[in-house]
Image (spheres, helix red, strand yellow):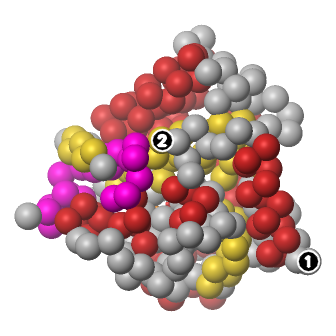
Amino acid sequence: MRVIIQPDGDTIAALVAESIVDLVNEKPNAVLGFATGSSPLGIYRELIKAYREGRVSFKDAWGFQLDEYVGLPADHPELYRNVINRDIESQVDFAEGRVHAPNGNSEDLQSAGDEYDAMIADAGGVDFQILGIGTDGHIAFNEPGSSFTQGTHVETLTPQTREDNARFFGGDISRVPTHCLTQGLGTIMEARKVALVATGEGKAEAIAELIEGPVSARWPATILQHHPDATVLIDEAAASKLE
Ligand code: F6R
């Protein structure tokens, strides 16, 4: 696992976006893994800028989201499918039907999860996975105690994660869904390249565990220590609890 410490989130976003631009230029039908939340927003802004400058086209590329809330209405602005559509998909030239999310409104969520893993495999597997990290060490929504080998599955969000995400729901935790359909750690570990980005002191404990702690389901992100091509990009505040 490589660790890159930069002065700020903008520098990190530019570095990650440049790697993605290079990848898509080399492999136009690359499969990109999209995270939601605050951490990847700068990366998406840089990708949109590169597209507008004519430095990259996504017309043959694929996108697979990490996770989706269970039970949010199709037109809810915080449905992750809508978030990614708004923040990146609709602003560049992805072809119709090339960006996907797990279906958190399926009547059979586990079958929907299995189908999602099959779709990722059919597209050739994820070439470049963008990840954020939760304050409790989750990646995607694999909360503490998650299996290291699972595929896409239903997860119960911890009170801490729901509190952290309440800012997207008008600050009201009762409006944050209790469950999600998420890629498992097994799915994420199959991505060929992974870039985890984190900024701010709130992430410092999870980052210290990720980089210096033992591999443990207590801090799910630590499984990335075993990934053959994972890079962790953090600012100085997120690095502040490293020894
Ligand atoms: C979202 C996701 C989560 C977030 C994490 C950090 O798709 O998979 O793991 O990356 O909760 O969220 P932010 O970036 O908002 O701090």
When asked about the image quadrant of residue 14, the answer is top left
Dot 2 crowding, Cα within 10 Å, few <14, some 14–19, many 20+: some
Q: Secondary structure at mark 1?
A: loop
Q: Residue at x 73, y 48 (%)?
A: 120
Considering only order in the chain, which callout, 2 or 1, is on the residue closer to the N terminus? 1
Residue 131 visible: yes
Count of marks placed on residues: 2
Q: Position of residue 187 (x, y in %)?
A: 61, 59
Q: Position of residue 210 (x, y in %)?
A: 30, 65
114 relative to 143, above or below: above
Q: Secondary structure at mark 2?
A: strand
* Amino acid marked by disc 2: Lys
When asked about the image quadrant of residue 166, the answer is bottom right
Q: Does the segment drawn in magenta span residue 219?
A: no
Q: Residue at x 91, y 77 (%)?
A: 107
Q: Nearer the viewer, residue 159 or 182?
A: 182
Q: Nearer the viewer, residue 140 or 187?
A: 187
* Amino acid marked by disc 1: Glu
Q: Residue at x 23, y 71 (%)?
A: 213
* Label 1 sits on residue: 107
* Label 2 sits on residue: 193
Q: Nearer the viewer, residue 75 or 226?
A: 226
Q: Residue at x 75, y 24 (%)?
A: 60
The residues colored magenta run 225-242
